[in-house]
Amino acid sequence: MLKEKFINLDQTIEQLFEDSKYDHLGMMKGMAKTIFRPLTPADFKDVYLSISKDQGMALYHLIKE
């Protein structure tokens, strides 16, 4: 069962990492809006904070503590 949890966790982290690969385009789009108005968090609502697989595992262990 523990091995199954890690497989699911690994798949989730990999999927999030893949989804975040092109977020630099979303960040540029959000930054472009600052030409006309101040920057807001909503400008980046669909952008992930890209972290490595190791960083994701470290966060997972930190949360589990």
Image: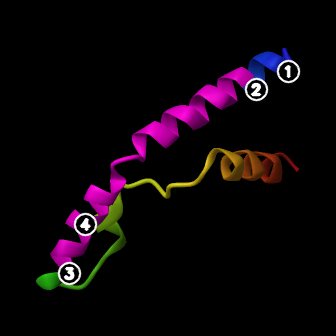
Mark 1 → mark 2, Cα distance in angstroms: 6 Å
Relative to 22, 32 lies left or right: left
Residue denoted by label 3: 34
Q: Which mark is residue 28?
A: 4
Residue 39 on the magenta span = no
Q: Which amino acid does label 4 sit on?
A: Met
Q: Confirm whether the magenta stretch covers residue 30.
A: yes
Location of the N terminus by quadrant is top right
Q: Which residue is drawn at 50% across and 39% down?
A: 16
Q: Which of marks 4 and 1 is in front?
A: 4
Q: Percent x, y for residue 64?
A: 83, 45
Residue annotated with mark 2: 6
Q: What residue type is labelled 1?
A: Leu
Do residues under tags 4 and 1 come within 8 Å of each other at their CB atoms? no
Q: Can residue 46 be seen in this view?
A: no
- The residue where tag 1 is placed is 2
- Residue 51, quarter of the rendered image: bottom right
Q: Magenta span covers which residues?
A: 7-34
Q: Looking at the image, do the residues carrying marks 1 and 2 touch, with CB atoms under 8 Å apart?
A: yes
Which is more N-terminal, label 3 or label 1?
A: 1
Q: Reading the chain from its start, which is encountered first: label 4 or label 2?
A: 2
Give the mark nearer the N terminus: 4 vs 1: 1
Circle 4 — which element? helix
> Is 35 situated left or right of 47 in this image?
left
- Give the Cα separation between the discs numbered 2 and 3: 41 Å
Residue 6 lies, with reference to residue 54, above or below; the image says above
Q: What residue type is labelled 3?
A: Thr
The kind of residue tagged 2 is Phe
Q: Which residue is drawn at 68% across and 30% down?
A: 9
